[in-house]
Amino acid sequence: MAWDESDVRLVPLEWLKPHEEIKVKNMKKLLDMTLRWNGFTKPLIVDKTTGAILDGHHRHAVAMRLELARIPVIAVDYFENESIDIELWPASKLKEITKQDVINMALSDHLFPPKTTRHRIADYLPPIHVSLEKLSLLSPTSSEESE
């Protein structure tokens, strides 16, 4: 699956739902880089129906830390898109995982441990640059939503 910048849209941060914890050390490194770049250079991948984060938990945590209003995402049809594969990281304690397990966790009050799941589709994200200033705006204009 190939995407470009036209597939990226800005969504309210509060719509997103993580399904796994983050590694704080990794988030702090990403926070430093985000501040240095003054923006996000990679979108999150999310389920378009639920807002479940499929890839980008650390970027989400950075946005939360910076108290941003919006964040760049590519929204996908998680269940219908057969090119989206899910697998477990080698260190995961789970024996197997399904897409439904990911959605159920995202909609619950619990989270999987860090680096439980890996979505191969995340290997094909387009390079972007969305400034922190733009992400801190409360209400996007219709043209900004598609950037």
Image (spheres, rainbow, N blue to C red):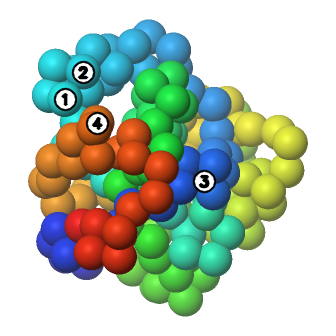
- Could you tell me how far apart the alpha carbons at marks 3 and 1 are, in whole angstroms? 22 Å
| Contact? badges 2 and 3 (CB < 8 Å) | no
Q: Is residue 87 above or below residue 147?
A: above
- Residue 78 in view, yes or no: yes
| Contact? badges 1 and 2 (CB < 8 Å) | yes
| Contact? badges 4 and 1 (CB < 8 Å) | yes
List the residue tagged with mark 1.
38
Q: Is residue 99 above or below residue 79?
A: above
List the residue tagged with mark 3.
16
Q: Callout 3, which amino acid? A: Leu
Number of residues whose C-alpha sits closer than 10 Å to that of mark 4, classed few (under 14), some (14–19) or many (20 or more): many
Depth check: give the residue in front, 116 or 58: 58
| Contact? badges 3 and 4 (CB < 8 Å) | no
Percent of width and height locating residue 10: 39, 61
For label 3, the SS is loop
Depth check: give the residue in front, 97 or 22: 22
Percent of width and height locating residue 95: 71, 48
